[in-house]
Image (tube, rainbow, N blue to C red):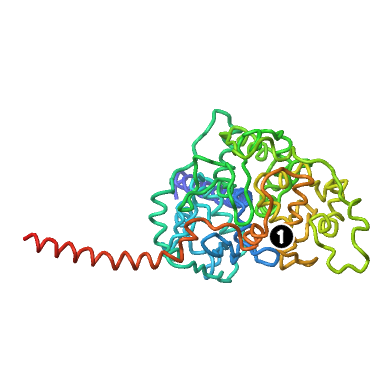
Amino acid sequence: MPFPALHKYRAALLGSFFLIIATLFCAPHAQGQAAKDQAALVEQGRYLAVAADCMACHTVPKDGQPFAGGYGIDSPLGRIYSTNITPSKSAGIGNYTEQQFARALREGVRADGARLYPAMPYTSYTLLSDDDVHALYTYFMVGVKPVDTVAPQTALPFPFSVRASMMAWNMLFLDNKRFTAVSDQQQINRGAYLTNALAHCSACHTPRNALMAEDNSKAFGGAPLGSWYAPNITSDPVSGIGGWSDQELAQYLQTGHVRGKNQAAGGMAEAVQNSLQFLSKEDTAAIVAYLKTTKPIRDAADVKPAHEYGQPKSAEASLRGAVGPNETHSLNSGAVLYSAYCASCHQANGGGSGNQAYPSLFRNTATGSANRANLISTILYGVERKVGDQDVLMPRFDSQSYVNPLTDEQIAAISNHVLQQYGSPGAPVTAQDVAVARDGGSKPMLARMQPYIVPLICLVAALIPLGLLGLSIKRRRRK
């Protein structure tokens, strides 16, 4: 073989050798980088899922598998069961494409085309960016353990059971668009995105119209939430959070408690426990900054902030020796009931414990609010939340109480004593108010109409042929 030809083949062989060596060294590096990128994406999705509080609805409290669904949400229209959103291919969303996942999040449409109820806050999630939807999809497909347990099926009464009706509802009330900046300040924009999209705060704190859609003209102005009341969180200094300092608001979001202001219970306790306490300090500050810019809404009944009412006061001296030692019906007043069931934690003067683990009942929004719902519900259902490694607990006094169940009349008596001693003036609590709260709260008009909808449909269906027949007879007579 001529020398030049040998040189040519030698060069080719050397080139191939170096290419193989480069591949052997670079391929693991590329694979390692890809794994790091996916891990970062999964972590981003995990954080977003926490900020969106997916755990609260899609996991049965205490003994449920993460995101396996089955949690019963007691809506005014009936119980709605959350679905399994693990990557299980038989029971969850393991067969969803990213496009189908995005459509379920943003439009409330499942992969099979069935419509979701807005108990799943897709009217808020519709604001999510494409990047965040991609991160969430990656997290649920890669970072969540599949659970092959089918969640119970939702069965609302007719006509709410007709999921296709949500098509018309969405046409009226779903503004299917992504988030747009609300300010020229980056922090406020971040807070608006967290508040309106991920944390979906308006789903609880904004009142709803007759068809159960959010009334955005009164955004964050406060709304009933079952037996509870999600308070006004607009920037108004009297009815809202305008009189709170930034530090107090941040502390409340992170811990669910601010001395001399408020403590989280009900749905807000769940939000703090499962979501808000895990947000970064920067994101918490962003939410606070945004809320301070919201349109103020003043409630007509408010003359001063709820947390400014009350002072320490004890009725114990008047109770000593009031009844004999053999009295069998001594729990006959709000003061006596308070002394028996409340004073051991909240103190005889209502001041609470020194560290405020048991909060003061004066300078407290639950007792100072003109709306009595949260006071009643706190006594009925207690308080339970966990922040870090600290458990906060107040026993419940409804029929499931492990202390002692109280009647509607007894809870009303305690409520009125607390209001008179430490709270705001106004309408007293009645036994009927407690009964309504025990039954899940006041029902909206749409729920109250449900028993009459089928007879009304039948009536209309019967009247239409009769009307057409009458019109036909009338035309014949004219001819």
Task: Classify residue 279 by image quadrant.
Answer: top right
x and y percent of residue 364 in the render? 75, 44
* Residue that label 1 marks: 380
In this rendering, position of residue 332 left or right of residue 293: right
| 110 displayed left or right of 40 | left
Residue 165 location in percent, x, y? 40, 60
**Quarter of the figure with residue 236:** top right
| Left or right, residue 476 beside residue 391 | left
In the rendered image of this protein, does residue 361 appear above or below residue 393?
above
What is the three-letter code of the residue carrying label 1?
A: Leu
Q: Secondary structure at mark 1?
A: helix
Front residue of 368 and 220 = 368
Q: Does residue 40 show up? A: no
Q: Residue at x 8, y 59 (%)?
A: 478
Tag 1: Cα neighbours inside 10 Å, few (<14), some, or many (≥20)?
A: many
Q: Where residue 158 sits: x, y (%)?
A: 44, 67
Q: Tell which residue pokes out farthest to the top in this image.
A: 184
Q: Nearer the viewer, residue 31 or 179?
A: 179
Q: Residue at coordinates 69% horizontally, 33% vertically from top-left? A: 243
In this orientation, which residue lies closer to the viewer: 434 or 13? 434
